Amino acid sequence: MLSSSELRQRRKERQRHKIRQVSVGKLRLSVHRTNCHIYAQIIDDKQGVTLAASSTLVADKKKMKNGGNKEAAVFVGKTIAEEAKKKGITEVVFDRSGFLYHGRIKALADSARENGLKF
């Protein structure tokens, strides 16, 4: 029997393979979540460089009591989209890193779309 982390790793590898086939030359918006925080990065896979990053760790602690809820995910989606706009990035490919497209992952994606990113 596979553990949940091994199952997520399989989903992650399967999704990355599909992303590589479909989106040649596009930047990747990679998302990672833990119980306490959520992280987002825009990555250029050709050069192996992170162009923009945001997380609940950089957020103002007074505004956000909990970094592991949907409100925090919406905040991270908004800030990553704003950073992308500053650097002239408008179109990315969404990489959910094996996490199900539900809850905080979906909230982050919707927030990034509302604030100008296309994927």
Image (spheres, helix red, strand yellow):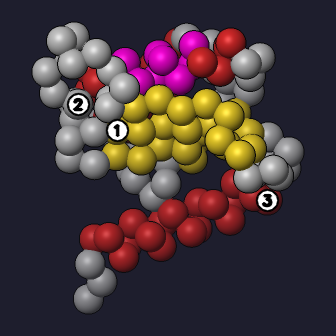
Q: Which amino acid does label 3 sit on?
A: Gln
Instruction: Give left or right: position of 24 versus 37.
Output: right
The secondary element bearing badge 2 is classed as loop
Please tell me which residue is depicted at 33% across the width and 21% down the height of the picture.
59
Please tell me which residue is depicted at 71% across the width and 46% down the height of the picture.
49
Q: Residues within 10 Å of mark 3 (few under 14, many from 20)?
A: few
Instruction: Give left or right: position of 65 versus 28.
Output: left
Mark 1 lies on residue: 38
Q: Nearer the viewer, residue 7 or 32?
A: 32
Q: Can residue 108 be seen in this view?
A: no
Q: What residue type is labelled 1?
A: Ile
Q: Which amino acid does label 2 sit on?
A: Gly
Decide: is 103 above or below 112: below
Task: Report the disc number at residue 21.
Answer: 3
x then y, percent, for residue 111: 46, 19
Q: In which quarter of the image is residue 8?
A: bottom left
The secondary element bearing badge 1 is classed as strand
Please tell me which residue is depicted at 54% across the width and 32% down the height of the picture.
53
Task: Report the disc number at residue 67.
Answer: 2
Highlighted magenta segment, given as a residue range: 73-82
Please tell me which residue is depicted at 42% across the width and 47% down the height of the picture.
32
Asked whether the residues under the numbered discs 2 and 1 touch, taking CB atoms below 8 Å apart as contact, a structural biologist would say yes
Query: Disc 2 and disc 1: Cα gap in Å?
Result: 7 Å
Instruction: Give left or right: position of 83 versus 46.
Output: left
Query: Disc 3 and disc 2: Cα gap in Å?
Result: 34 Å
**What is the residue that sits farthest to the bottom in this orientation?**
1
x then y, percent, for residue 47: 81, 50
Q: Residues within 10 Å of mark 1 (few under 14, many from 20)?
A: many
x then y, percent, for residue 119: 66, 30
**Which quadrant would the N terminus be assigned to in this image?**
bottom left
Q: In which quarter of the image is residue 39?
A: top left
